[in-house]
Amino acid sequence: MDENNRITITVCGDGGCGKSSITLRLVRSQWTSEYDPTIEDSYSVTRTIDGVPYYLMLTDTAGQEEYRGLWAASNLQSDAFLLVYDITSANSLDALDYFMEMIEMETENRLDNGKIPPIKCVVGNKCDLQGQRVVEAKTGLEWARRRKCGFMETSAREMVNIEETFALLVRRVVEARRLTAGDGPANRTAALPLHSNPNRDPNDYAAHTQNEKDSEDEPKQSFWRKLKCWSVSTPIREQQAKRAIRDTESAEGRMSKPHIEHEEPVQDGLSRTLKDLFAGAVGGVAQVLIGQPFDIVKVRLQTTSQYSGALDAATKIYQNEGALAFYKGTLTPLIGIGACVSVQFGGFHYARRAFEASNEAKTGKGQLSYSQYYAAGAFAGIANTALSSPIEHIRIRLQTQPHGANRLYAGPIDCVRKLTAHQGILGGVYRGTAVTFMREAQAYGCWFTAFEYMMNADAARNNIDRSEISTLKVAAYGGLAGEVLWISSYPFDVIKSKMQSDAFGKEQKYKSMRDCFAKTYRGEGLGGFWRGIGPTLLRAMPVSAGTFATVEVTMRLIS
């Protein structure tokens, strides 16, 4: 084979970022999650690019810090360098500074001796793990741009952009050789021109990246053509692949046109939070429609002693008030609970990402501990209190008022007006907020922790990404998490319901949260704190299952 068609490529980066996975995907089309730490491995493979066969000699190098002295001594003579980091580890991107410093010294040495400078491309690997992403595509792109490198995002596991990345390097090396042979010394930026025009001013050269050839008359590959060449065998992986290439093409578009900074904005924290809020709102609507009949029975049992049990309460409500009574006061929770669940999921994932970033900065690993999952859930519950306290207060007033002509409130707005007239906004509409605060923190801390534990255990047990867990399993885990939520927080809910259904003025029975706890214990014993737990747990399973399944499916669709 012609010597000009031989290209040496060194793959470098921190340990565990997927260098070996990328290399083996190209050479052997295989992927495994288990590798022994690499000191140095060499591979060769032939690839035909733009109709020309090239013999690629690849060196997969040591990432561990103790081996880096060996790296500098033996790996600086390559035609191209692939600098790999892990998008779930900020430290792995920082680690590229060491390798880049060595490559820049080699670049200066080659230029001083009239040789071709090496081609450099930065690769963000593991782009299939979007839920664990710590390094945004925009951050990686900007890092690469500052150092005049190309940029791509890849997934060795899903075979996303592996062939395209190496094809990109080959084209850049070939173009650099052609320019040096025909146009004099190579440009000192070690970058390539936007167009293969031999008359172009070398000072116009700019760092850029594309998946395809630079010629203006060769159009970009279509999205679907790219998708066909990936090893994607399931609908979920297809969605991951689509998302990955959207992120990458967004970055590429901005890099290939360096004077246009506003094209295809990369998804940031705000857009993720908005998606969390939207998915939560959809889940909230499902929660109300499934759980409202159970909730009516629960509140009646908590606030009055005229029923012997859940079945007796349901029977009498139906006989005396009709079937629609089970959806009495639904408009308020339909709007309000949708907003509440939206805040719950938005708050939880906001706190989760904050913990991931903090863990990554401290230990290099973004995985949360279960105490952190609890704290993130508690944060979501606390944030939710501002909405849930008045919404549930109004709902309870509407659910417990007399039937027919004796009713106290014409509807939610009338209820708010009369509560405000009695004791103002804080004392009226926001009555019971202190105990609601305690209930929400405990309930949602346990809710999200239980769900995340079951999801993480399933993913680890079956060696899959959590996005591949079936919707049926998501619903089952969500249902069990709902049982945990109520068992862990039910006494607080009983006190909240008693306080929010209490009268005003001289007829007010409970003067404070503490007074309500004391009177409940003296009058009903410990059993008073668990009155109505039966229908609540019966309701919790389908309601929580429907909520998590709806949110998860919605997130997969909009992501």
Image (cartoon, rainbow, N blue to C red):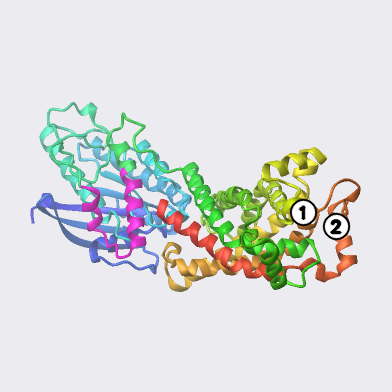
Q: Is residue 558 above or below residue 491?
A: above
Asked if residue 131 is among those painted magenta in the image, a careful observer would answer no
Q: Amino acid at mark 1?
A: Val
> For the residue labelled by badge 1, is the local secondary structure a helix, a strand or a loop?
helix
Q: Amino acid at mark 2?
A: Cys
- Could you classify mark 1 by the number of other residues whose Cα lies within 10 Å: few (under 14), some (14-19), or many (20 or more)? many
Q: Nearer the viewer, residue 29 or 184?
A: 29
Side of 83 where 383 appears, left or right: right
Q: Nearer the viewer, mark 1 or mark 2?
A: 2
Q: Is residue 402 above or below residue 409?
A: below
Residue 435's tag is 1
Residue 516's tag is 2
Q: Is most of the magenta stretch helix, strand or loop?
A: helix
Residue 157, visible in the rendered structure: no
Earlier in the chain: of badge 1 and badge 2, it is: 1
* Image coordinates for residue 416, horizontal then vertical, percent: 72, 42
Q: Nearer the viewer, residue 360 or 325?
A: 325
Q: Nearer the viewer, residue 455 or 313?
A: 313
Q: CA distance from mark 1 to mark 2?
A: 10 Å
Asked if residue 232 is among those painted magenta in the image, a careful observer would answer yes
* Image coordinates for residue 453, horizontal then vertical, percent: 56, 66
Viewport quadrant of the N terminus: bottom left
Which residues fall within the magenta stretch?
Answer: 222-249
Residue at horizontal 19 percent and vertical 56 percent from the top: 56
- Could you classify mark 2 by the number of other residues whose Cα lies within 10 Å: few (under 14), some (14-19), or many (20 or more)? some
Residue 102, visible in the rendered structure: yes
